[in-house]
Amino acid sequence: MTDDHDPVASPSERPVRRPFVDLAPPTTARGDDALASLLFDALDAAAEGVVEHDVPHGFHSWPAGMPPAVAATILDGLVDVDGQKGGGVVDPFSGGGTVGLEAVLHRRPFLGVDLNPLSARVGAVRTHRRSPGEADQFKAVVDAVVERSKRRVRERVRVRAEVPDDVAAAYAPHVLPELAGLLEEVAAVDGDEHRRTLAVVFSSILTKVSRRRGDTARLGGDDGADEKRVGRFFASEFFGAKAHELCRRQVALFARVGPAAPKPRFVVDDARRLPALLPPAWGRRAALVLTSPPYGGTYDYARHHAHRLAWLGLDAERFSRDEIGARRRRDRGPATFDAEVAAVLAAVSDSLADDGLAVLLMGDGELAGQRVPADGQLERLARGAGLSVVAVASAPRLDWRGGPARQEHLVALRRVHR
């Protein structure tokens, strides 16, 4: 007897989405010739959609994050341009862990900081290296969880989804209990590492199995429902497919860098507290800060991730309260965002080694009806934070609201020696 459900394609069989598909090739570069050229090349690589296919880039949707091609190009190029072959790398807005994964691939120590409590979990999973022997054990656990979840569905085991009503409403009546049962099976898994990893895999499927639009549409503020058809067992089997694909990529990462590369560290905290978070072993200074801060008045990360945080039982209060540049507060105007960015720049300055470099990827903001060019904002605020802008590259990007194209900027800064 066969189960009546839609087949699940392996994630590796589906097309790889380009991270910056709406980014045009860069048009301008200025400042230090070598650094400006490197920044230009990084934006160009992002526009082309160059992505590593064999490591966990792309696992767990994280819209508006730094494209892997940007981080890879910067870390590669700094060896020649800046003489950086080692030293600690910091991302104070670490999001889904893209910079952390590239730091692992470049065998550099890494610290990721983010107010979103989901960020540290996703980053740790994306950067985890799994040996072939560990992979066999993990896949056996995954298969057992999937089978137990499907058995629950067949036997109509009663279970309550411990999520708010608005989150529950995003799922079809037959999908909601399947997810709740699947999560209970994940929680029952032995071994902290397996349990943490599978919780993140669970988080990664939530939008796909909901009635909602994809992450990118929802990030722009469109929460309208598209009544997608999600078949019986689809959630459980898609979960299994995602877990197996993640495992394959973690094994590939192990093969690339081995077990001896520095283990990255991810913490849930505020970028404005960065100096207090740096490891003493680094002398509390970073060689490189590579990050993509929030764009002013553009995205609502706390709202975007609210359904995932609710399912996993993660506390979002501080994240929602202290999120920088949130779209829901765009009416406060540019001065408020200036103060937030100035505080971040001061923290970056206090965290950089004397010969260190900061590279920020920022897009133009829009606050209280005013377009805020990000490169000009950083140049205005840098000096007061003890920094100097040394190079900039820019590329046009479509405005999803239909207005004039915004500019995406890569900006390099150094500490001002006094």
Image (spheres, rainbow, N blue to C red):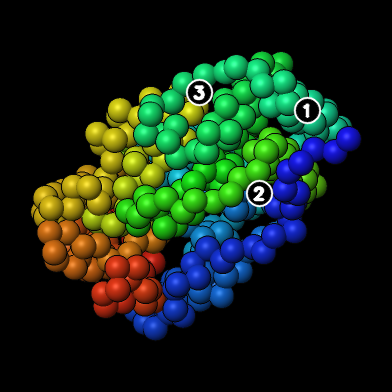
Alpha carbon distance from label 3 to label 2: 29 Å
Whether label 3 touches label 1, CB < 8 Å: no
Q: Is residue 379 visible?
A: no
Residue 106 in percent (x, y) is at 63, 53
- Which image quadrant: the N terminus? top right
Mark closer to the chain start, 2 or 1:
2
Local packing at callout 2 (Cα closer than 10 Å; few below 14, some 14-19, many 20+) is: many
Residue at image location 21% in from the left, 62% down from the top: 366
Mark closer to the chain start, 3 or 2:
2
Residue 100 in percent (x, y) is at 55, 46
Task: Locate residue 411 relative to residue 94 in the image: left or right.
Answer: left
Mark closer to the chain start, 3 or 1:
1
Residue 127 in percent (x, y) is at 63, 41
Question: Identity of the amino acid at label 1?
Answer: Glu
Is residue 11 shown above or below 377? Answer: above
Alpha carbon distance from label 2 to label 1: 25 Å
What residue does disc 1 label? 147
Nearest the viewer among 162 and 344 is 162
Question: Identity of the amino acid at label 2?
Answer: Pro
Secondary structure beneath dot 2 equals loop
Nearest the viewer among 195 and 293 is 195
What residue does disc 2 label? 56
What residue does disc 3 label? 161
Mark 3 vs mark 2: give the one in front. Answer: 3
Is residue 331 shown above or below 259? Answer: below
